[in-house]
Amino acid sequence: MITPVLPTYARIDLEFERGEGCWLVTKDGRRYLDFTAGIAVNILGHAHPYLVAALTEQAGKLWHISNLFRIPGGERLATRLTEATFADTVFFTNSGAEALECAIKMARRYHHANGAERPRMITFEGAFHGRTLATIAAGGNAKYLEGFGPDLPGFDQVPFGDVKAVEAALTPQTGSILVEPIQGEGGVRVPPAEFLRSLRALCDAHGMLLVLDEVQSGVGRTGRLFAHEATGITPDIMSVAKGIGGGFPMGACLATEEAAKGMVLGTHGSTYGGNPLAMAVGNAVLDKVLEEGFLERVREASLRFKQSLAAVMDKHPAVLAEVRGEGLLLGLRAQVPAAELVNALRAEGMLVPGAGDNVVRLLPPLTVSDEEIGIACDKIDAACRRLEEAFHLSPVKGAAE
Ligand SMILES: *Cc1c(COP(=O)(O)O)cnc(C)c1O
């Protein structure tokens, strides 16, 4: 039977009344340690007083005016983002998929402006770029494409991390490469260190644009402002969302002046993109992320968490196979079906999202304390014991799905 809310999500039957930092509290007062963080969104935790103040102050002044008028908060945020990154210009959106749509359009338009039609884009197996028609075509996940054809043409998919396969897939119409520095939904898959550098070199050699999807890996999640900074290369175009609004829906497409040269007056737009509410929160989020020591603290927390997770994994080799990821974009590859681990963790009062590759993601707010990391590891330990008992009784014998 159809429900009033379109039933495209298998929702967990929990009703939260409020959040406090890394914790979510149900109506009846049960507290859950939230290492889902809205899927890598709430980077400053729930109800951060500084964000609440920024939003409510703006809400009392002006919510929305459209991009027909100047929006000073947006000019300020764009300036700050360009000063902090490779980019010269920013287009604000309401979501990650829209930031990707802008990036894909910009890449096609760049070659059009050069008088060459090179609309084809190389993408990677296991990628996730969103749920619009263009982004499901870019992601190439058969499950997300089924029944929504005809698929948007122009995407050529190759195995993640495989530079030779990229070279083999190049055609005269190939104008760009789209890649996540670390695949999030795909299972927290970290490619070899040289991978992005090789893609950069390939783009330079063939006059192609390198487009990075940092929707999940960006805004401090990996312990750098953006994940690609660790590799020493810069992209031509980059899509950002999730953490950039700290829970307020917003995204951004950043680009160099050269890459953006086709996006002239009238070529793109959004009614809500960059509205005053989003810009007030976005500036407030950036204030905190750029504070002295913030990113360093994410790297420290990551190290501590990884070390503790390694110890938990040693105790439970039949449940946990691998700890992977960078910063606080971490994953546990499970020996049992990952969904079982997600459920066992919820029974222990900890919320985590799954991912591809039989991985459970650990995506705490970046403000997570050492104490909370300790609590998380205790809960993971307890969940593993729970699963060891359950699978001892079950005929599945701990085999991966
Ligand atoms: C979540 C995500 C998207 C899509 O963002 P939406 O806001 O859901 O449209 C795109 N790319 C990556 C890497 C993501 O993690």
Image (cartoon, helix red, strand yellow):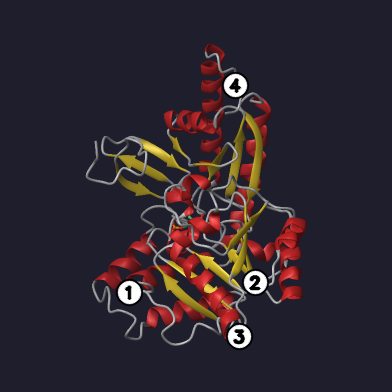
Q: Which residue is mark 3?
A: 115
Q: Earlier in the sequence, mark 3 or mark 2?
A: 3
CA separation in Å, label 4 and label 2: 47 Å
> Is label 4 in a helix, a strand or a loop?
loop
Q: Residue 139 — which label?
A: none
Q: Amino acid at mark 3?
A: Gly
Q: Earlier in the sequence, mark 4 or mark 3?
A: 3
Q: How many marks?
A: 4
Q: Which residue is mark 1?
A: 271
155 relative to 152 in the view: left or right: right
Q: Nearer the viewer, residue 105 or 218?
A: 105
> Is label 3 in a helix, a strand or a loop?
loop
CA separation in Å, label 4 and label 3: 57 Å
Q: Which residue is mark 4?
A: 398
Q: Amino acid at mark 4?
A: Gly
Q: Which residue is mark 2?
A: 173
Mark nearest the camera among 3 and 1 is: 3
Where is residue 194, by image quadrant? bottom right
- Image coordinates of residue 55 in percent, x first then y, are 32, 67
CA separation in Å, label 3 and label 2: 12 Å
Q: Earlier in the sequence, mark 4 or mark 1?
A: 1
150 relative to 230 in the view: left or right: left
Question: Dot 2 surroundings within 10 Å: few (below 14), some, or many (20 or more)?
Answer: some
Question: Dot 3 surroundings within 10 Å: few (below 14), some, or many (20 or more)?
Answer: few
Q: Is residue 167 above or below residue 400?
A: below
CA separation in Å, label 1 and label 2: 32 Å
Q: Amino acid at mark 2?
A: Gln
CA separation in Å, label 3 and label 1: 30 Å
